[in-house]
């Protein structure tokens, strides 16, 4: 049976299992952070935290899609990466609309709460980033979720700055 490629199939199955485990973990982290950041954002009247919670929801959806794509074809994975980019763009537009609305009709948010929640989000996103780091070169699907996590870490810095400015 020298041409069966059984070993490479078993190796790929193990790699897919590792990817699935990582994606389930980061999906849960983002689901919990969505609820926490939304509650804190509503309490602190912070559009930055509400936007951060929307980003966590988007990430959870992206990780769920990525989880579904793990064992699919490269074409399917590329399509999933495109959908993930569209989701991120849509959330960005919604955040921009919310900020413009807040400039005209908002109240002053609670800066300390913004910074505290952003710090918790930063730790959560750094955890996701670290977990996904080992898979970033696996395929386009895993690279796209790693890029989402990297962007979340950057965005958390922006939310902390927003809290300082308040």
Image (cartoon, rainbow, N blue to C red):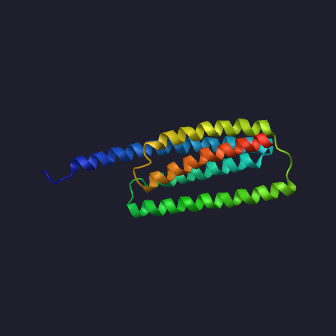
Q: Can the viewer see residue 124 in this picture?
A: yes
Image quadrant in which you'd find residue 94: bottom right
Residue beneath the point at 51% across and 63% down: 82
Residue toward you, 126 or 105: 126
Residue beneath the point at 65% across and 57% down: 91
Residue toward you, 154 or 32: 154
Residue beneath the point at 60% across and 53% down: 58
Horizontal relation, residue 78 to residue 156: left or right: left
Residue beneath the point at 43% across and 42% down: 134
Location of residue 80 in the rendering, given as x and y in whole percent from the top left corner: 48, 60
Total marks in image: 0
Residue toward you, 49 or 165: 165
Residue toward you, 29 or 145: 145
Location of residue 22 in the rendering, given as x and y in whole percent from the top left corner: 46, 42
Outermost residue, left direction?
1
Say above or below: 73 vs 11: below
Quadrant housing the C terminus:
top right
Location of residue 123 in the rendering, given as x and y in whole percent from the top left corner: 60, 36
Say above or below: 154 vs 100: above
Location of residue 98 in the rendering, given as x and y in whole percent from the top left corner: 76, 57
Horizontal relation, residue 146 to residue 121: left or right: left
Q: Can the viewer see residue 63 in this picture?
A: no
């Amino acid at each position: 049976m020298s041409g069966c490629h059984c070993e490479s199939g078993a190796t790929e199955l193990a790699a897919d299992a590792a990817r699935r485990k990582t994606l389930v973990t980061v999906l849960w982290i983002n689901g919990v952070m969505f609820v926490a950041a939304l509650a804190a954002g509503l309490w602190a009247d912070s559009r930055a935290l509400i936007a951060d919670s929307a980003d966590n929801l988007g990430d959870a959806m992206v990780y769920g899609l990525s989880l579904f794509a793990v064992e699919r074809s490269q074409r399917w994975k590329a399509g999933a990466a495109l959908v993930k980019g569209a989701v991120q763009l849509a959330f960005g537009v919604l955040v921009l609309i919310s900020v413009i609305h807040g400039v005209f009709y908002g109240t002053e948010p609670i800066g300390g709460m913004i910074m505290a929640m952003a710090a918790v989000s930063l730790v959560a996103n750094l955890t996701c980033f670290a977990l996904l780091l080992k898979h970033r070169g696996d395929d386009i699907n895993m690279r796209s979720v790693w890029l989402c996590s990297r962007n979340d870490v950057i965005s958390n810095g922006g939310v902390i700055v927003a809290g300082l400015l308040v």
